[in-house]
Image: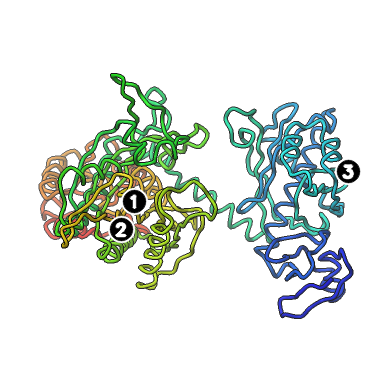
């Protein structure tokens, strides 16, 4: 057999040769350094037979991305072995421990267990110690192919492995991997030896997880670990995690009194507190101003709709798993709305439309409801009731590209306004062969082509992602990187030929005939709840002046300065700025400290001298640190803050 190397050279090898054989044929140094390989783009380990004619690359430490995926998976197996050793010391046998799946994931791995007694967080350091012992033993990973019958016999004690094995095709080879006396069902790939695994890893946490993600199945115990090629990378990752904890929107949301989630109200249904409501209103005001400049028309729609509306749109049953059950009212069925778009279609259809009327741009901050499993709910970023900054544009085909580009421009403007400048663009298209999409194939091809042409026209860098389309049309997603380097999918633009067809909406063209409009679905924020959750963490609660719920606090040095402070606060309020006076009995330093903890961007100190001259001492929070100014004329400061608020600087 022969394989082809990255430089195009062919390597002749005996039949059944492995990647390790290929490395040895090239040279002893490479055989020593090789950790894994790729064959026709797929990761394989050094023990796996290579396909005839494969294009191969040997993976060493010089291929960090490929190496990381393999050593993280291998460390998962080492951890699984260490868990067995841990329970062995407690008197349990190997068959007392059942194992679910254990894949490598971004930055690490996890493994699910059905354990004879729960593992505690405080047990993780001991598991980690055993892992390091196993690594120090330099155990070889070996690979063995077995029949389905052999695999079932090997794992007869483990119902989870049995379930996985029985689902495999009868003619597909099943692979087992072994290091030391630990054997597991696995596709691989793995490092050749535990001694080659990097020591820069840490077990992070344990939690419950339903078997195969189904809440009707047993809950297993999941252990998470992280691993990197170097200790420096691990230390940087752990430091980012600590910073993420400091910025956690759930903690800051409570401290800054932005929102609360009350179990008596219901899981995943946030209540906006007064401070959070101000933040939310500032966001909606900003977007409404932008929409006004672009001739959008506001609409308001109900929170429930007749089930036939959702049947016509295709949301029911296509999204049945993420929708709340229908409600029967007067022999009719209704449903909490999961989407705003069918309502907007019916508003468009409420009167005849001419080609001169288009484009019609309908916008709504509409609250929708979707069923999320309890274990997936997370503060504001994963909820069951949320408000979308939704708009639907009904356009003639000849208007589509111009309108799409305008929506693209608006979405980029929104993200830049919040300092979200690292954006990745993703074109979601159909997954070939899937039956989860509705509509004519020609319309799909046309919509996909038009999105890509529009992106190319403005030089937008993008990737094409099969399977990421909505069920009714392709889309352009905006994937934003925050200050911690985490990616979030925020705004989206979708091109839709299908809903106009399903609802049979038309406009009268210049020729006097009925024509079908095209829809553009658009949501720059995505949802206000999720966007606010991300903003809280992006800013760490230190919002810019225009967004801060509490903008200005005036701190009198003594009680005799309270009246002057109230006068200044009233002048700020008359100018449209949010100001308050701390007239508590606390000492001045304590008042400053309280304002700092509340992350109020502007603090003004007033005493005898300031009152006599109508001045203030200013202490401001900025991204670079505190900025202090003394003897600032109040009228000048008022004009400055007004301008910063007006321009959203």
Name which of mark 1 and mark 3 comes first in the sequence: 3
Q: Residue 258 in the image: state x and y as whole percent.
A: 33, 39
Please state which of residues 538 and 155 is positioned toward the viewer in this rendering. Answer: 155
Q: Using a 10 Å C-alpha cutoff, classify the residue at mark 3 as few (fewer than 14 neighbours), some (14 to 19) or many (20 or more).
A: few
Secondary element type, mark 3:
loop
Name which of mark 2 and mark 1 comes first in the sequence: 2
Q: Can residue 522 be seen here?
A: no
Report, in whole angstroms, how far the alpha carbon at label 1 lies from the one at label 3. Answer: 53 Å
Residue position marked by numbered label 2 in the rendering: 414
Is 533 above or below relative to 232?
above
Residue position marked by numbered label 3 in the rendering: 181
Secondary element type, mark 1:
loop
Q: Quadrant of residue 398?
A: bottom left
Report, in whole angstroms, how far the alpha carbon at label 3 lies from the one at label 2. Answer: 57 Å
Please state which of residues 307 and 14 is positioned toward the viewer in this rendering. Answer: 307
Lateral position of residue 328 relative to residue 463, left or right: left
Q: Residue 472 in the image: state x and y as whole percent.
A: 40, 49
Does the residue at mark 1 contact the one at mark 3 (Cβ under 8 Å)?
no
Lateral position of residue 466 relative to residue 597, left or right: right
Residue at 30% across, 49% down: 500
Does the residue at mark 2 contact the one at mark 1 (Cβ under 8 Å)?
yes
Residue at 21% across, 46% down: 348
Is 573 above or below relative to 230?
above
Is 240 above or below relative to 413?
above
Q: Residue 294 in the image: state x and y as whole percent.
A: 19, 59
Residue 525 badge: 1
Q: Can residue 350 be seen here?
A: yes
Name which of mark 3 and mark 2 comes first in the sequence: 3
Q: Quadrant of residue 150?
A: top right
């Amino acid at each position: 057999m022969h394989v082809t190397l990255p430089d195009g050279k062919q390597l002749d090898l005996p039949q059944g040769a492995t990647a390790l054989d290929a490395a040895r044929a090239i040279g002893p140094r490479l055989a020593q350094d090789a950790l894994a390989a790729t064959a026709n783009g797929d990761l394989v380990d050094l023990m796996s037979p290579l396909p005839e004619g494969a294009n191969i690359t040997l993976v060493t430490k010089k291929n960090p991305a490929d190496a990381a995926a393999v050593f993280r998976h291998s460390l998962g197996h080492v951890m699984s072995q260490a868990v067995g050793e841990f329970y062995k010391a407690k008197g349990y046998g190997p068959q007392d421990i059942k194992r679910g799946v254990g894949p490598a994931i971004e930055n690490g791995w996890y493994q699910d267990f059905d354990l004879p007694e729960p593992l505690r967080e405080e047990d993780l350091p001991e598991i980690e110690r055993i892992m390091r012992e196993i690594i120090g033993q330099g155990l070889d990973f070996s690979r063995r192919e077995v029949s389905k019958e052999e695999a079932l016999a090997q794992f007869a004690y483990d119902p989870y492995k049995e379930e996985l094995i029985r689902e495999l095709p009868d003619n597909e080879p099943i692979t087992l991997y072994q290091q030391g006396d630990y054997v597991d069902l696995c596709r691989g790939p793995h490092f050749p030896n535990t001694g080659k695994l990097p020591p820069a890893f840490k077990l992070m946490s344990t939690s419950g997880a339903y078997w195969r993600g189904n809440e009707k199945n047993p809950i297993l115990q999941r252990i998470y670990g992280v691993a990197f090629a170097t200790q420096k990378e691990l230390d940087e990752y752990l430091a980012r995690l600590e910073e993420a904890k400091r910025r956690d929107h759930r903690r800051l949301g409570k401290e800054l009194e932005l929102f609360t989630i009350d179990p008596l109200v219901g899981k995943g249904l946030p209540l906006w507190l007064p401070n959070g409501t101000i933040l939310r209103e500032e966001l909606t005001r900003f977007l409404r101003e932008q929409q006004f400049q672009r001739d959008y028309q506001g609409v308001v729609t109900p929170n429930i709709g007749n089930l036939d509306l959702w049947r016509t749109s295709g949301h029911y049953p296509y999204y049945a798993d993420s929708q709340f059950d229908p409600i029967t009212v007067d022999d009719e069925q209704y449903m909490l709305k999961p989407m705003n778009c069918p309502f907007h279609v019916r508003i468009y259809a409420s009167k005849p439309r001419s080609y001169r009327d288009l484009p019609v741009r309908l916008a709504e901050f509409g609250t929708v409801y979707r069923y999320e499993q309890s274990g997936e709910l997370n503060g504001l970023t994963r909820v069951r009731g949320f408000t979308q900054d939704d708009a639907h544009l009904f356009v003639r085909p000849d208007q589509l590209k111009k309108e799409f580009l305008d929506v693209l421009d608006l979405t980029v403007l929104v993200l830049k306004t919040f300092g979200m400048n690292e954006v990745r663009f993703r074109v979601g298209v159909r997954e070939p062969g899937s039956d989860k999409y509705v509509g004519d194939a020609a319309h799909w091809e046309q919509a996909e082509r038009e999105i890509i042409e529009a992106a190319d026209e403005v030089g937008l860098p993008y990737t094409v992602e099969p399977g990421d389309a909505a069920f009714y049309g392709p889309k352009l997603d905006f994937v934003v990187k925050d200050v911690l380097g985490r990616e979030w999918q925020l705004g989206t633009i979708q091109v839709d030929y299908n809903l106009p067809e399903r609802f049979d909406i038309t406009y009268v063209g210049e020729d006097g005939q009925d024509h079908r409009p095209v829809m553009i679905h658009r949501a720059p924020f995505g949802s206000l709840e999720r966007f606010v959750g991300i903003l809280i963490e992006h800013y760490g609660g230190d919002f810019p002046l225009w967004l801060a719920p509490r903008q200005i606090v005036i701190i009198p040095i003594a009680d005799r300065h309270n009246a002057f402070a109230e006068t200044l606060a009233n002048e700020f309020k008359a100018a449209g700025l949010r100001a308050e006076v701390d007239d508590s009995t606390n000492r001045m330093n304590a008042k400053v400290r309280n304002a700092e903890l509340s992350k109020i961007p502007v603090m003004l100190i007033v005493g005898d001298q300031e009152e006599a001259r109508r001045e203030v001492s200013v202490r401001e929070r900025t991204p670079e640190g505190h900025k202090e100014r003394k003897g600032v004329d109040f009228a000048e400061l008022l004009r400055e803050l007004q301008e910063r608020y007006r321009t959203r600087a």
